[in-house]
Image: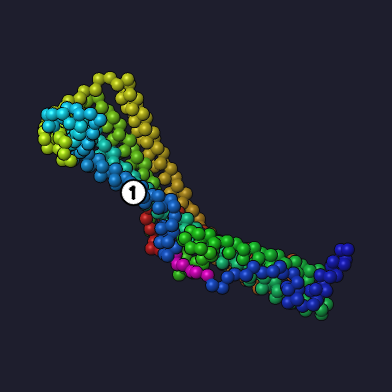
Amino acid sequence: MRRAAAAAALALLLAGPARAQEEVAAPSVEIEPAVATVTLAEALSRSASVDPNYVAALRQVGDADWVRRSAWSAFLLPVVDFQWSWTKGSSPFFNLGTGGLTDELTQFALRGSYPLFRGGSRIFDLKAASASVDGAEAGEQRQRFTTALQTEADYYDVLLQKELLRVAGERERRAVEQLDVARARVLTGAAVQTDSLQLLLELTRAQVDRLRQETAYKVARLQLGRRVGMAGPVDAAPLAELPGAALPLSEQDAVREAVERSPITEVARAEERRTDALFKSERGAYLPSLSLFGSWTGFGDQFIPDATTRASYGVQLNFPIWDGAQRELRLYRANTARQVAEAARLDTELGVARDMTEAYQAYLTARASADLAERAVAVARENLRVQDERYRVGATTIIDLITAQVDLTEAEAGLVQARYTTRLALAGVEAILGRRVYEK
């Protein structure tokens, strides 16, 4: 059986490399000819409008702003209430407005109150609302760059898979060329049959790798389409150049800026300020409150009651003494929330310093890897050229030639991955800083 299989493979080989490639290859995955293409700037803009997390973060800014407006309104304006009622009885009753018996009573009341002092709670409520707005704005900025990081990852993945598909195609092309050379050498007796079989195996592996890359490329474009809110696959426009320069700030400066001004730490600091203000507001419940109030009331039996009107106004003092420890419970919980927020803020600052160091080093490593990968490609290409010439004159083995081909493919794939890893590492640095290091 093994001899029969080997004979069939050899017959297929001797039939010609084109026939061999046709028989061995599986049906190729067709790539749609008409696919929408977006630039990186367009992808970043579109993803920000369709990402649910960013939309939620943007709405939270509006919600926090309305809370602040409410706090300012409570601080500056009185509380006003208007009531109107009409009552009809089954039998006549005394109407306070007309002073006689009637079966109808119309009443309206306009009341207002304004707190003069509430133990400072209104001021601290206003500070808490302002801190919530600051936190929401920082959260929106953080989510914007998080969305940008995810978008760039999908964008670069499309370009990466496209480049890897090109590398796989080059590997297949080289295998076909070497198969042609091997066929000629087998026919002339300059090479043994096992050389041809080794090259046929390499061609098969190259074709399988190409098919896998076509699938990966298709899936990557579908993911990019989902990210930018477009149905179907979306292609990524080629980038003008890949980053290779050193970052315009040192690692120490990057860590310092991240700790001091990163949106991540700003959110934690805003939450700490908010919980501290709420704790002080609850503590103000131990102090008395002083308020002004006034009302204007009308009674009668008409739609607009004007038979009798009364006005009243005054000052109200409220001094809470004991409410079943509910005040103490609220104060304890507010203090707990404040302590948790303080610990979270410290942990966030330490975590950001660590993450910034990791992201910075990742960028440096990716840059160095890209430089080394370029050198590796040049060396592998020259090695393949030498091995090819040596094999043609019978000075080397087929194993050395195939090894050189595989080494070149791996070096080219490593270079492609290193270049886009550098881009993604830069996006990671920007996501922590909350700003662009270079213009995209």
Q: Nearer the viewer, residue 394 or 75?
A: 75
* Image coords of residue 383 (percent x, y): 65, 69
Looking at the rendered image, the quarter that the C terminus falls into is bottom left
Q: In the rendered view, would you say 156 is above or below 324?
A: below
* Image coords of residue 110 (percent x, y): 17, 37
Assign a secondary structure to mark 1: helix
Q: Nearer the viewer, residue 110 or 177?
A: 110
In the image, residue 252 lies in the stretch drawn in magenta: no
* Image coords of residue 177 (percent x, y): 70, 75
Q: Nearer the viewer, residue 345 or 131?
A: 131
Q: Which residues are magenta?
A: 35-40
Residue visible at 82% across and 79% down in the picture = 187
Q: Is residue 15 left or right of residue 118?
A: right
Q: In the rendered view, would you say 155 is above or below 80?
A: below
Instruction: Determine which residue is flagged by label 1.
Output: 61
Looking at the rendered image, the quarter that the N terminus falls into is bottom right
